[in-house]
Image (cartoon, rainbow, N blue to C red):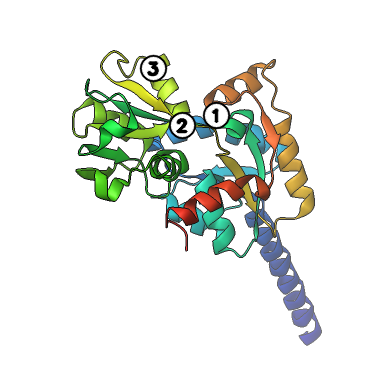
Amino acid sequence: MINVFRSNALRALAACAVLAFAGVGQAQQVFRMTAIPDESPTELARKAAPLVKYLEGKLGMKVEFTPVTDYAASVEALVNKQVDMAWFGGFTFVQAYVRSGGKVIPLVQREEDEKFRSVFITSDAGIKSLADLKGKTFSFGSQSSTSGHLMPRSFLLDAKIDPDKDFKRVAYSGAHDATIAGVAAGKVDAGALNISVWDKFVADKKVDPSRVRVFFTTPTYYDYNWTVHADMPAALREKLQKAFLDLNPNTTEGKDILALQRATRFLPTKADNYKGIETAARSAGLLK
C-alpha cells in the first residue's frame, strides 16, 4: 500500500514538474517590445499593432507592445531585460549602450535614418534664421530626444547660439507632436523636431504650413533604430533582423507596416553609425 501511495505521489510530482516547466516555457514565448514615447500614446499603439501581428507570424511566438512613460524608461527597460527590443532614437541608443556597458545591439534602421534631419519651425514672421532666435522662447521635444533636442542643440551651438543663455525661455514639450502644438498655439516662438513627424503632420493637414513654417533644416545625421539586448540568442536575433529586412512595399502587409513606420525599407545597422551622436552628446554636456 505504501509503495502504491509512493508511486502515485511520484507521478503527481512528475506531472507538476511537467506543468511547471511548460508554464516557464510558455512564459518565455512572449516577445516584448517598446518604443521611446516621441509621439502620443494612441499614435504609438496604432503604429505598433500591424508590426506586432507581422512579427508574431515571423517569430512563431506571441509579441506584445509595452508602452513606457518616458525616454529614460525605454532605456532602462531594455538594459534590464524587461523588454526584448526597443525602438530608440540615436541618442537613446547611445544612452542604452553606455548604460549597459556595450550590451545592446542596434539591429536595423530605416533607410531614412541614414540621413535624418531635424526642422526648426515658427509662426513668428520675424524669425528667418537661427540668429533670429536670440531673445525668443523656444521648445525642444524630450530632453533625451535625438531629433527633438540633442542634434538641434548641437547645430545651435555650432552656430554660436547657446539656448540656455541666448533664449528668453527654453521649454521641453516631451514629444514632437506636442512641439508643433506649442508653436501653433503661440506658447513658444519656435521649436525643433523630427522632420518625419513634421512631414506627416503637413501631409495629414494637421498643421497649416502657411501659419507654422520651417525656417531651418539641419544637416543629416544617423537616427532611429530597433535595438536588442546582446544576450538575445543569435538565432532569434537573426530571425528578427530578417523579418524587418523582408518587409516589402510591394505586398499589402509590407506596404502598410512600412507606411506606419514612415520607412521606405529597413537596413542592417551597427553601433559605429552612432559615434557621431555620442560625440555630439558629450560636446553638448548631455552625456557624461
| Horizontal side, residue 34 vs residue 174: left or right | right
Image disc number at residue 218: 2
Residue at 36% from the left image edge and 39% from the top image edge: 175
Res. 245 visible in picture: yes
* Secondary structure category for the residue under label 2: loop
Residue at 33% from the left image edge and 32% from the top image edge: 130
**Mark 3 vs 2, N-terminal side:** 3
Res. 78 visible in picture: no
Q: Do the residues labelled 3 and 2 touch (CB within 8 Å)?
A: no
Give the residue type that dot 1 points to: Gln
- Mark 3 closeness class: few <14, some 14–19, many ≥20 residues within 10 Å: few
Q: Between label 1 and label 2, give the one nearer the viewer.
A: 2
- Closer to us: 217 or 27: 217
Image disc number at residue 202: 3
Q: Between label 3 and label 1, give the one nearer the viewer.
A: 3
Separation (CA) of disc 1 from disc 2 = 22 Å
Residue at 43% from the left image edge and 44% from the top image edge: 154
Residue at 55% from the left image edge and 37% from the top image edge: 221
Image disc number at residue 261: 1
At which x and y percent is residue 229?
64, 56
**Mark 3 vs 1, N-terminal side:** 3
Separation (CA) of disc 3 from disc 1 = 17 Å
